[in-house]
Amino acid sequence: MPHPLALARFRVLDLTRVRAGPTAVRQLADWGADVVKIEARDGDQVEGDRDGSDFQNLHRNKRSLTLDLKRPEGVAVLKRLAATADVLVENYRPDVKDRLGIGYEAMRAVNPRLVYASISGYGQDGPYRLRPGVDQIAQGMGGLMSITGPEGGGPVRAGIAVADTSAGLYCALGILTALLEREVSGEGQWVQTSLLQAQIAILDFQAARWTMDGEVPPQAGNHHPTISPMGTFPARDGHVNIAPLGPPMWRRLCEVLGHPEWIEDPRFADARGRGRNRAVLVDLIGAVTRTRPSAAWVEAFNAAGIPCGPIYALDQVFADPQVAHLGMAEAVAHPRLGPIRLVGQPIRMSRSSGAIRSPAPERGGQADEILAEAGYGPQDIAALRRDEII
């Protein structure tokens, strides 16, 4: 028999939309939490096409209930659900939830054990608290765009929603931490993060170069900002990534490239020298690597124990045998779209496995069962539907 899903004992109320919040909740859903997605009755244009790949990937493994939270009857339903829930996640602008009467203190009064998680653009307080938060803006304000792209080429955004995604992951980590702490204290608490905080935190060593060393990191293009040589080099048919770490790998790199004399070259004798002479070294290596196809270099460098790899387009990523072995494209049956493939969980555990068990739900598709579980009878549910609360 398969082992039970790790988070199956938790119920989560999902009031999020767009990306950061749904990313957080998806982590919980994939590991088995019972997630109830609370949606507006008339839909939400911001979330895009419900049948599209993005929506399906973000909202798999959830059930859906539509609810008008602008009316007190809708708030009353939410509070009834929250009374027995473990987690509530929202990413409203900080003032909106209190105006609706569903802020942390209001929900804590209903259920002191509730872990209430909030994601905002800039934080729940401070001078920017009411500004609308968007990933692109956070990438700029959080410093990522200043260190991304070719040297001197001007700011470049990352090709993914780094601020949104990292905020969602940090939020999920905070929720799990709060649930663990609740086992000791018996109380829930308010978990908060923001796109700006997450973007700065995910900079990691680049941010620490400023906080500790007072150094403003520049753009370094496709080469590592502090280690040389480590980066992207031309091949006959494209490019290859090479990442020799430490003196032994540097020596092996020189030998594979057919230039053992570089080992003793005073310009490249140590890591500091290779960093100072990065431009010259990159040109020398590139002149050699462009003479053979990337696959030949990958084979040669791997044989020498030097980290390296091809640079794939997305179709090539999912065609790679190691990616296929890891199951990073996971199939699920959609009742209308048929079989679809979504992006799998990147975590494996020896007993408790995450899984994509169901596609994104139809809007309000599980309203009756969700409300029945909260104690509403058939007549009550019919009245809520008649009065356009659900």
Image (cartoon, rainbow, N blue to C red):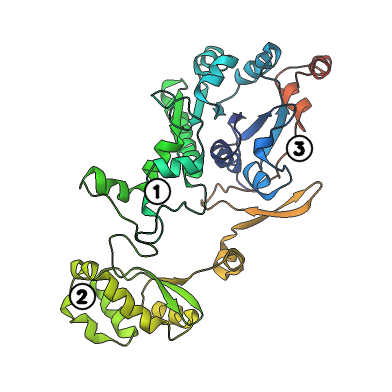
Of circles 2 and 1, which is in front? 1
User: Dividing the picture into quarters, in which one does residue 319 lie?
Assistant: bottom right
Q: Amino acid at mark 2?
A: Phe
Label 3 or label 2, whichever comes before in sequence order:
2
Q: Secondary structure at mark 1?
A: helix
The local crowd at label 1, few if under 14, some if 14 to 19, many if 20 or more residues have their Cα within 10 Å, is many
**Residue sitting nearer the eye, 132 or 185:** 132
Residue 375 lies, in percent from the top left, at 73, 17
Task: Say above or below: 34 vs 301.
Answer: above
Secondary structure of the residue carrying tag 3 is loop
Crowd tier of the residue under label 3, counting other residues whose Cα lies within 10 Å: few below 14, some 14–19, many 20 or above? some
> Which residue sits at x=82%, y=14%?
383
Front position in the image: 135 or 190 = 135
Quote the CA–CA distance across marks 2 and 1.
Answer: 30 Å
In the displayed structure image, the side of residue 148 where residue 175 appears, left or right: right
Q: Tell me residue 26's x, y (percent).
A: 58, 41
Task: Measure how far apart labels 1 and 3 are at the Cα level.
Answer: 36 Å
Which amino acid does the dot numbered 1 rest on? Answer: Leu
First along the sequence among labels 2 and 1:
1
Q: Is residue 79 above or below residue 337?
A: above
**Residue 211, x across and y down, in percent:** 24, 42
Front tag of 3 and 2: 2
* Amino acid type at mark 3: Glu
Q: From the viewer's perspective, is 202 left or right of 38?
A: left
Which numbered disc, 1 or 3, marks the residue that appears first in the sequence? 1
Mark 2 highlights which residue?
268
Q: Which residue is mark 3?
A: 362
Residue pointed to by mark 1: 144
- Left/right placement of residue 188 relative to residue 15 reads left
The answer to whether residue 306 of the structure is visible from this angle is yes
